[in-house]
Amino acid sequence: MTLRRLCVKELDAAMEIIELMKVSVRNGRYRLAINQEADLLFVVGQSLTWINRLEFNQVKARRTAANNTSNSTGAPVRATKAQCIALLNAAKKNFQAAKQLVLNGRYEDAENVIAATITGRILRCINSLR
C-alpha cells in the first residue's frame, strides 16, 4: 500500500471515529466518547506521520530532479540538528505553558497551546536530517 493510500486510510478512520463519537455523545456514553477521542488522536498522529513522509519524499524527488538538471554543486538545504532541537525546546516550553494554564483553570487556552504545538514541523525537521 502506498504512503498516500495509508494516509487516506487513516483520515477515513478519523472521520469514522468522529461519527462514532457523535453517536456516543448522543446516547450519553461519554466515557466511550473519551476513549474514542484517544483513538482519534492516534490516527491523526499516524496521518501526520504519513503526510510528513510523503512531503519528505516529494522534496527529496524535487532535489534529485534539480540536481540532475543543473550543474549546481550547492548542497540541498536541510534542517540542522540545532534547528530540530530548537523546535523541540519550543514544544517543551509550550507544554510547560499549557501546564501552567491548566493549573490556573484556563483550560481552553491550554488546549489551544497544545493544539498549536502538535504540528508536523518537528517531524519534517527530523525527516530532513535523514
Image (cartoon, grey):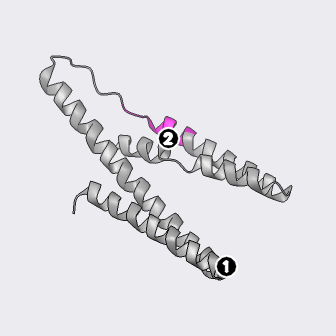
Tell me if residue 75 comes above or below residue 13 in the rendering. Answer: above
Residue 74 position within the rendered picture, expressed as x and y whole percent measured from the top left: 26, 20
Q: Quadrant of the N terminus?
A: bottom left
Q: Residue at x 41, y 68 (%)?
A: 13
Q: Residue at x 23, y 32 (%)?
A: 62
- 119 or 129: nearer the viewer: 119
Horizontal relation, residue 41 to residue 125: left or right:
right
Magenta residues (range): 78-86
Q: Residue at x 31, y 48 (%)?
A: 54
Location of residue 128 by image quarter: top left
Residue type (three-letter) at the residue carrying disc 1: Tyr
Location of residue 36 by image quarter: bottom right
Residue 29 position within the rendered picture, expressed as x and y whole percent measured from the top left: 64, 83
Q: CA distance from mark 1 to mark 2?
A: 38 Å
Residue picked out by circle 1: 30
Q: Residues within 10 Å of mark 1 (few under 14, many from 20)?
A: few
Residue 80 within the magenta-colored segment of the rendering: yes
Q: Residue 84, which numbered label?
A: 2
Q: Quadrant of the C terminus?
A: top left
